Amino acid sequence: MNPEPLAAPVVTAPDGPRLSRLVQGYWRMDAWDRGVDEHLAFLQAHVDLGITTVDHADLYGDYGNEERFGRVLARAPGLRERLQIVSKCGIQLPSETAPGRRVKHYDATARHITASVEHSLRKLGTDHLDLLLLHRPDPLMDAGETAAALVALRQAGKLRHVGVSNFTPAQFELLQSRLPFALATNQLEIGPLATGPLFDGALDQVQRLGIRPMAWSVLGGGRLFDASNTRGKRVRTALENVGERLGGWSADQVAFAWVLRLPSAPLPILGTGNIARVRAAVAAVNLPLDRESWFEILEAARGEPVP
Ligand SMILES: NC(=O)c1ccc[n+]([C@@H]2O[C@H](COP(=O)([O-])OP(=O)(O)OC[C@H]3O[C@@H](n4cnc5c(N)ncnc54)[C@H](OP(=O)(O)O)[C@@H]3O)[C@@H](O)[C@H]2O)c1
């Protein structure tokens, strides 16, 4: 299958970054078990398909994936300018790389955000992030302090844009109220196995603000394909039935189309390291999912019809 490459990147928010319609996630990069040349071939292949935005976080791969990715970029001078690099900070994991840290926690202090961004830039071998996200809402966040750190990093040219991830609408509004620029996105878990943001106000908020959310784990982190997962199996069957009826699309393609069909126009983040599956997702951008088929999948996700 050789789909048409994606059209040009899209603006995610008023004055926001231009990101590709699909984003390649690098959370699982360390598990792909590849050398630098193979990583580079994968990166070049998805960039050629129009997936120019890559999603990272400081902690991915036990704080190692940004450095892995930096080694790949160093092998291909010129590629950096074609990419939009997204990274995140704010989760502190106990790790061998952080001796003495006992408890997994969140940290939205100015000190941590600044140190984490500088660390990410060094590891990635770049002088700026196109988009920084606060990875999780920190209940101890002092919004004024957090905002001041983000403003300073942006003024220093280290960040082009700022957004959040996994924020409720109220948390989003609190941080936004302290910032002189608009938050660029809210990266949320959205998919047939994760329908929360459709009903808790998060997608209504971004639609109102004209912001495109980013969607993580659209395939439930692979749970859709786990035969021992009862709900996953039920939803996969619905996806397969719809795909067959619409002309032979696979379950993963229908899942991406289901998210793309949302009026807030989310940017799905792919988690696969398999280029054939990336191509399938690119083709799914043109999958015409009708309203009743969309609700058929929601019904399978809920286990009952909508009220
Ligand atoms: N902001 C946050 O809090 C947050 C949280 C989690 C993730 N993320 C971001 O979102 C990205 C995507 O998340 P995700 O990796 O969980 O995405 P996902 O697409 O839901 O899951 C990817 C997993 O599913 C497997 N898979 C994909 N297609 C398959 C198929 N047809 N059959 C069987 N297995 C299949 C992949 O294996 P193969 O590689 O073998 O295809 C991979 O292990 C991450 O890389 C990260 O950048 C953000």
Image (cartoon, rainbow, N blue to C red):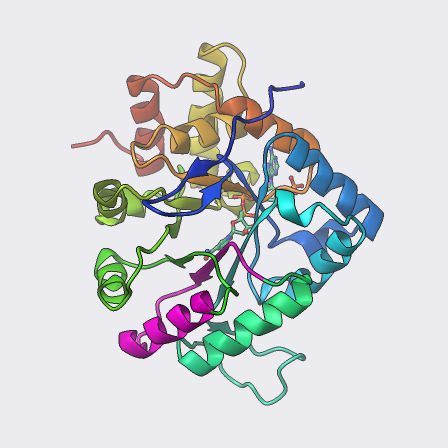
- Magenta-highlighted residues: 128-155
Residue 72 image point, x, y percent: 76, 53
Q: Residue at x 44, y 67 (%)?
A: 155
Question: Is 240 left or right of 163, judged from the image as shown?
Answer: right
Residue 167 image point, x, y percent: 32, 59
Q: Is residue 138 above or below residue 294?
A: below
Question: Is 153 left or right of 121, judged from the image as shown?
Answer: left
Question: Is 113 left or right of 139, judged from the image as shown?
Answer: right
Q: Residue at x 29, y 32 (%)?
A: 263
Residue 287 visible in image: yes
Q: Quadrant of residue 57?
A: bottom right
* Number of numbered labels in the structure image: 0
The quadrant of the rendering that contains the C terminus is top left
Is 131 inside the magenta-drawn segment?
Answer: yes
Q: In the image, ligand 1 is in what quadrant? A: top right
Q: Residue at x 69, y 63 (%)?
A: 125
Q: Quadrant of residue 31?
A: bottom right
Residue 63 visible in image: no
Report the residue that reaches farthest toward the bottom. 100
Residue 151 image point, x, y percent: 38, 69
Q: Is residue 163 above or below residue 116?
A: above
The quadrant of the rendering that contains the N terminus is top right
Question: Is 55 left or right of 245, judged from the image as shown?
Answer: right
Residue sitting nearer the eye, 254 or 177:
177
Is 77 inside the magenta-drawn segment?
Answer: no
Q: Is residue 194 above or below residue 27?
A: above
Residue 99 image point, x, y percent: 63, 87
